[in-house]
Image (cartoon, rainbow, N blue to C red):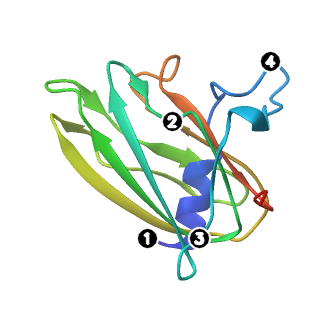
Amino acid sequence: MSCVALASILALGAVGCSDDDGAVDLSKCKSVAPVDGVTELTITGKNMAFDEECFQIEPGAVEITFVNDDSGVTHNLHVTGPGEVNEATPLERGVVTHVLEVDLVEPGTYKYICDPHPKTMKGNLVVGEVPA
């Protein structure tokens, strides 16, 4: 997947850890530092919600493992953000895993949602300096 594609995926929609004006409450974000130059995230869809609603990460390569743990329910992980990219994981039913690989080099807030369930399944990827 191209860097542009991932960036577009990350910028979509409103998010659970944002307030009404779109500002992100960083106290609700899980900080994840890169290991060997890659930030690895896992997001699970279960019971019509994502298990994590906000991540704070450094700019660079990001590998997102999306797990659909709702048997018989279709979910996806759609990420959008700064840039021209707009991609989503394939829609799947049952327990499936899909890995997105992107380069998020532009600081900013990227959004992720489940297209079929955007009101309950949403989150933010805040790209910038990760607190120590």
Q: Identify the residue shown where x is 47% and y is 25%.
A: 121
The residue singled out by tag 1 in the image is: 1
Decide which of tag 2 and tag 4 comes sooner along the chain. 4
Instruction: Indicate the quadrant containing the N terminus: top left, top right, bottom left or bottom right.
Output: bottom left
> Do the residues under discs 2 and 1 have CB atoms within 8 angstroms?
no
Instruction: Indicate the quadrant containing the C terminus: top left, top right, bottom left or bottom right.
Output: bottom right
**Secondary structure beneath disc 4?**
loop
Task: Judge left or right: residue 64 versus residue 53.
Answer: left
C-alpha gap between disc 3 and disc 4? 30 Å
Task: Judge left or right: residue 88 versus residue 108.
Answer: left
- Residue 117's tag is none
User: Looking at the rendering, which quadrant does residue 105 occupy?
Assistant: bottom right
User: Where is 131 relative to 37, above or below?
Assistant: above
User: Where is 58 relative to 28, above or below?
Assistant: below
Q: Amino acid at mark 4?
A: Asp
**Secondary structure beneath disc 1?**
loop
Q: Amino acid at mark 1?
A: Met
Q: Residues within 10 Å of mark 2 (few under 14, many from 20)?
A: many
The residue singled out by tag 4 in the image is: 20
Q: Identify the residue shown where x is 80% and y is 18%.
A: 20
Is 55 or 76 nearer to us in this picture? Answer: 55
The residue singled out by tag 2 in the image is: 52
